Image (spheres, rainbow, N blue to C red):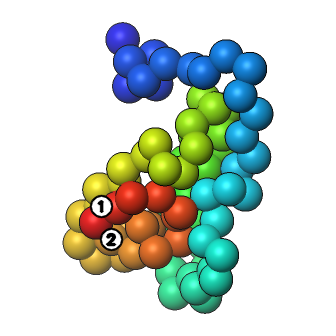
């Protein structure tokens, strides 16, 4: 069972991945070509595809560059 199937999709709820972009988007400080840009895009797309709104998502990140992910993703996070 994947993590996504455990979460489950919501029927009939359209969510745009731009809902996960903060109102005041900070300038990304990742290095050009960093894989974190792809992770952020995939995370936004996956949550939109699952029909989850930002108030239903908790993002827990580690330290270092990946820890900045919660600054660029509109949800609960630390």
Residue at 76 percent across and 33 percent down: it is 14
Pick the front one: 64 or 72:
72
Location of the C terminus by quadrant is bottom left
Q: Nearer the viewer, residue 36 or 33?
A: 36
Within-10-Å neighbours for mark 2: few <14, some 14–19, many 20+:
few
Q: Residue at x 58, y 65 (%)?
A: 37
Q: Nearer the viewer, residue 16 or 66?
A: 16
Say left or right for 27 vs 63: right
Q: Where 44 sits versus 47, above or below?
A: below
State yes or no: discs 2 and 1 in contact (Cβ < 8 Å): yes
Q: How many marks?
A: 2
Residue 41 seen from this side: no
Q: Secondary structure at mark 2?
A: helix
Q: Which of the two residues, 61 or 7, is positioned nearer the viewer here?
A: 7
For the point 40% across and 75% down, the residue is: 68
Q: Is residue 64 above or below residue 5?
A: below
- Residue 61 numbered tag: 1
Left or right: 11 in relation to 56: right
Q: Which residue is mark 2?
A: 67
The location of residue 43, given as percent across then percent down, is 55, 48
Q: Quadrant of the N terminus?
A: top left
- Rounded to the nearest angstrom, the CA distance separating label 2 from label 1 is 5 Å
Which of marks 1 and 2 precedes in the sequence?
A: 1
């Amino acid at each position: 069972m994947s993590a996504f199937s455990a979460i489950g999709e919501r029927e009939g709820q359209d969510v745009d991945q731009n809902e996960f972009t903060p109102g005041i988007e900070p300038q990304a400080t990742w290095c050009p070509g960093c894989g974190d840009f792809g992770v952020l895009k995939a995370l936004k797309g996956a949550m939109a595809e699952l029909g989850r709104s930002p108030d239903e998502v908790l993002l827990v990140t580690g330290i270092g560059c990946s820890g900045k992910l919660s600054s660029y993703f509109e949800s609960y996070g630390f």
